[in-house]
Amino acid sequence: MNAFAGTGRMIRLALRRDRFTAPVWVLALAGFLAATTALWAEELSTVADLIQEMRVTAASPGIRMLGLASGASVGAYTMVRDFLLVAVLAALMSTFAVVRHTRQGEETGRAELIGAAVVGRHAPLAAALIVTVAMNVVLAAVMGLAMVAAGQPAAGSFTAGAAVAAVGLAFAGVAAVTSQLTSSTRGASGMAAGVLGLAFLTSGIGNMAGHPDPSGLWVQSAWPAWLSPIGWGQQMRPFGGDNWWPLALAVGLFAVCAVAAPVLVGRRDFGHGMLPQRTGHAQAGRALRSTLGLALRLQRGALLGWAVGLFGFGLVMGGLVGQVRDSTGTSRDWYTRMGGSDAILDAYRASIMQMAGMAAAIYAVQVLLRLRSEEADGPLEPVLATATSRFRWVAGHAVITVLGATAVVLLFTLGTALAAGGVLGDPAGQLRMLLAASIVQLPAVLVIGAIVIAAVGLVPRYAGAVSWAVLMAAILVGPLFGDTLKLPQWVQDLSPFTHVPKVPAVPLTAAPVLALLAVVAALALTGLVSLRHRDLALPA
Amino acid sequence: MTAPIVVSGLMKDFGSTRALDHLDLTVSAGEVHGFLGPNGAGKTTTIRVLLGLLRRDAGDVWLLGGDPWRDAATLHRRLAYVPGEVNLWPNLTGGEVIDLLGTLRGGLDRVRRAELLQRFALDPTKRCRAYSKGNRQKVALVAAFASDVELYLLDEPTSGLDPLMETVFQDVVRERRESGRTVLLSSHILSEVEALCDRVTIVRAGRTAESGTLHQLRHLTRTCVVVETSRSVDGLAGLPGVHDLSLDGPRTRFSVEQDELNHVLERLVALDVRSLASSPPTLEELFLRHYGDEIASGRTDTELAGVR
């Protein structure tokens, strides 16, 4: 039998399954790009503004890590601000799509059903890659159109679309390989996300270690930027020369992976990965023998990843205190506005702590949604058939989430204090200054966590969508973007992050903290009561 | 002492689908009770209501003398459950799951745990994602039987086991009964129910179709008779209670309702019986009598879709 037999049918199946998911990804990414482009076109309406703003972004190593300056234009400025985020999301879109149509099928057993039909060994992978490539091509075109619609020149707009799709394409290839290496959906996506993190770091370091050219508007990256698919996309320089040849690097990586993955398929058994399955303990350790222990075990992987990530993030942010102290103009204004004080370093401390709080909130949503997946996938059923009450089960996950969120915020604080101490001296003193600011973030994080519990109790089937949407909205209208987006105060007040006291820039007040905690109690109680009174939505 | 499980007039709807429609079920202490029905008849739904995982819409449900919805966690100390579809955490080992579930229930017997692992030939060091369906079921079975509880709720527990393991399972259930425990065994494997159960309840489309001992249920049905007589059997087909009469060379086959058996035998004697074989109805025949019409009209799937 031809190894590719049935690929056409598999493509149709994949398209049918993705008929909502794929358009939502593409439209959301393009819509975000168009909206922010229009926003900056309005904000930076004069050439002088543009030049000043671009010089700041090119001069600051911190901002260079997050975006690459390529000349003074609205389009180029949009690339500095948006490219990294959009490219990471495109990479995730591709990763999820490839894993969904390959490894997930094998893990759930659907692929077995299909493999027994007239479908070749390589057909599912081929179909997954063809569909994902098509998604990226469409994404490139729609993003280009979106930027043209936002008033940008066509050449740069379509280069921008292609640069984002280049990253998506490269990660379609990466995911095709990781899907063969591990035997679980989680593992395959996680490994690809790890490569993505590495790609971000290498391109970021390459840009940080680079230098602005004499005009001060263009950053020449150092060599590490060329090791990363994200770097390749940035080096296409949309709106700054429109250099298309780095796209060949992304296509090349995709091609290598697309050839390697089927070879791996041929060498492994169905349902297994290339990496060996390790055996484990024949008995549960004392730590695992409780709902708390189970929750810790289930959240452990995510906690470790976030702990390392936020500690590193803290080191980077702490290391930037020197630049921030010496900064001028709009970026100084941004920090003082967000930090709520003219004392720039205190304002900076308050603002990065808010970012850490938001990161911890993302962590909280991710791990608490385990409540929903435990119910929907079935492992909850035998647990609740024991002497474990629903309340106890939720409490186990909630306690571990609170402890985990506290730990990641504290690790961020530690990283910041160490790096800032390296620049300014006295790490212990830096830590003391930041400690109150880190703890004060937790009530806002808990509000987001309580929303997840409420969603799981009230609308279990939509708990994931509701939780992520509320989180995104809370971040968007909160102090990080709310002012920039010129939102009215009452809208900004809807975000719990708006109410976090801006310690150490502003003295700590108890009232907003107590108010946030009251909201936490009300939401969590609502969730628990409705969970107690509803049917479990178990698999059939 | 009241019966461990008393369900009467239980109703449960999922949206517009009626899953349970006045279902009755009584399980007495110390018995192995077979809970029979095809896929979608409402067996799993009933057990989930008994576990307080689903809320009843109407009817009375008593579990171990308590209300399974209100007192779920307290009552669960006294029972163990094996789900029909065993979904476990892919990154935990079988041994860890057994200990975890046992501890959450209130403790398990280490000696019995080791013995069961050996009897079911289960490797406890493998991670759950590496187990087959049958092995996941063994994990749940060992976790349940390693706890010494009053009541075992087993939902199609052997659907993934091989015949050898099926025998082990039957031995374990018999041992539990001998120590005075109660077992509710949901199944559609009739030989298993016939081998193990003292009483059975047959459900159909969310309703109790029959309930009683196997003996009683057989009594309600027909005995198969194969007889060879010297004289012609004319007229036999017309007797009350005689069905499906067919001629097979010198032999005549028919089935006869239990109540009419005596009359029919009197008539046969007059025909000069040369040989006679009679067999009690098997559970298959019982089952087919309840579902045969659906199978014949092919309605089972559509009528019962989504009800489980």
Image (cartoon, coloured by chain):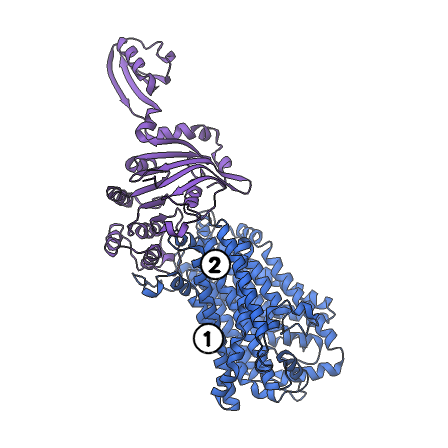
Chain colours: A blue, B purple
> How far across and how far down the image is residue A125, in percent?
49, 58
Closer to the camera in the image, A511 or A327: A511
Closer to the camera in the image, B103 or A164: B103
Chain of the residue that carries numbered disc 1 in the rendered image? A
Q: Secondary structure at mark 1?
A: helix
Chain of the residue that carries numbered disc 2 in the rendered image? A
Name the mark nearer the viewer: 1 or 2: 2
Q: Is residue A169 visible?
A: no
- The disc, 1 or 2, on the residue closer to the chain's N-terminal end is 1
Closer to the camera in the image, A282 or B148: B148
Residue at the right extreme?
Answer: A46
Q: Which residue is mark 2?
A: A371
Query: How crowded is the residue under tag 1: few (<14 C-alpha within 10 Å), some, or many (20+)?
Result: some
Is the residue under label 2 in contact with that under label 1 (CB below 8 Å)?
no
Q: CA distance from mark 1 to mark 2?
A: 24 Å
Going by the numbered disc 1, the residue's amino acid type is Val
Point 44% across, 37% down: residue: B41
> How far across and how far down the image is residue B39, in percent?
43, 39
Q: Is residue B278 visible?
A: yes
Q: Do the residues marked 1 and 2 share a common chain?
A: yes
Residue B286 against residue A375 in the figure, above or below: above
> How far across and how far down the image is residue A471, in percent?
58, 65
Q: Secondary structure at mark 2?
A: helix
Residue at the bottom extreme?
Answer: A425
Going by the numbered disc 2, the residue's amino acid type is Leu
Left or right, residue A150 beside residue A132: right
Left or right, residue A377 beside residue A348: left
Question: Where, by quadrant of the figure, is residue B196 drawn?
Answer: top left
Point 45% across, 27% down: residue: B293
Question: Where, by quadrant of the figure, is residue A337 drawn?
Answer: bottom right
Q: Which residue is mark 1?
A: A308
